[in-house]
Image: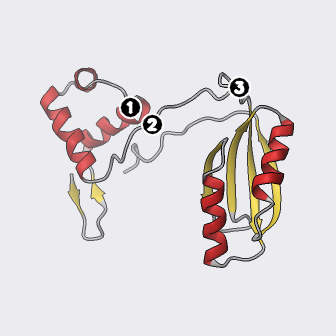
Amino acid sequence: MTKTQSGQVTLDATDRAILAVVVRDAEITNKALAGRLGLAESTCAHRLRQLRERGVITGSHVDLDHAALGYPLQAVVSVRMGSHSEQLVEEFFDAITATSQVLQVFHLAGSSDFLVHVAVADAAELRDIVLRHITVHRGVRQTETHLVFEQRTGPGTVSNR
């Protein structure tokens, strides 16, 4: 693994193989990782440490079954701002990312300024999030709510190049 002048990290096939496994299973033990890839445990441990030190791996996460927690309905709320001042955008971004039941927030270029991914108990709770937490911000001009029927995760960027 090396860094280019632009600061981008160049990964070799071993780094990419390690990332492909840990992206799918962040809790895999070093021994299991080494066994799956046919590498020495010390090689895997060293490579993982390097990937963390270089900022390629920035953390790990747990996937939750929101339906099992009482939030079976997911939606993506598209938000258009009436004003794009830095202050209004930052205020909205900070407030919405601190809102309960918000899973992800994307700040975008294009016809929508934000996409807000939420998990809620029912349609009434979805309405309340939109009315009490999104449209109340002074910069918000319009919202459009899209129900999520199904979500799948793609391979990401590990397999590229």
Question: Which residue in the structure is indicated by mark 2?
Answer: 61
Question: Which three-letter amino acid code belongs to the residue tagged 1?
Answer: Ala
**Percent x, y for residue 25?**
40, 28
The mark closer to the camera, 2 or 3, is 3
The mark closer to the camera, 1 or 3, is 3
Question: Which three-letter amino acid code belongs to the residue tagged 2?
Answer: His
The numbered mark at residue 1 is none
Q: CA distance from mark 2 to mark 3?
A: 20 Å
In this picture, is 13 found above or below 44?
A: below
The one of 150 and 12 positioned closer to us in this rendering: 150
**Percent x, y for residue 14?**
24, 39
Question: Which residue in the structure is indicated by mark 3?
Answer: 70
| SS assignment at label 2 | loop
The one of 123 and 150 positioned closer to us in this rendering: 123
**Percent x, y for residue 133?**
75, 54
In primary-sequence order, the first of circles 1 and 3 is: 1
* Residue drawn at the location 56% of the way across and 37% of the way down: 153
| 10 Å crowding of disc 2: few (<14), some (14-19), many (20+) | few
* Residue drawn at the location 15% of the way across and 34% of the way down: 43
| SS assignment at label 1 | loop
Question: Which residue in the structure is indicated by mark 1?
Answer: 26
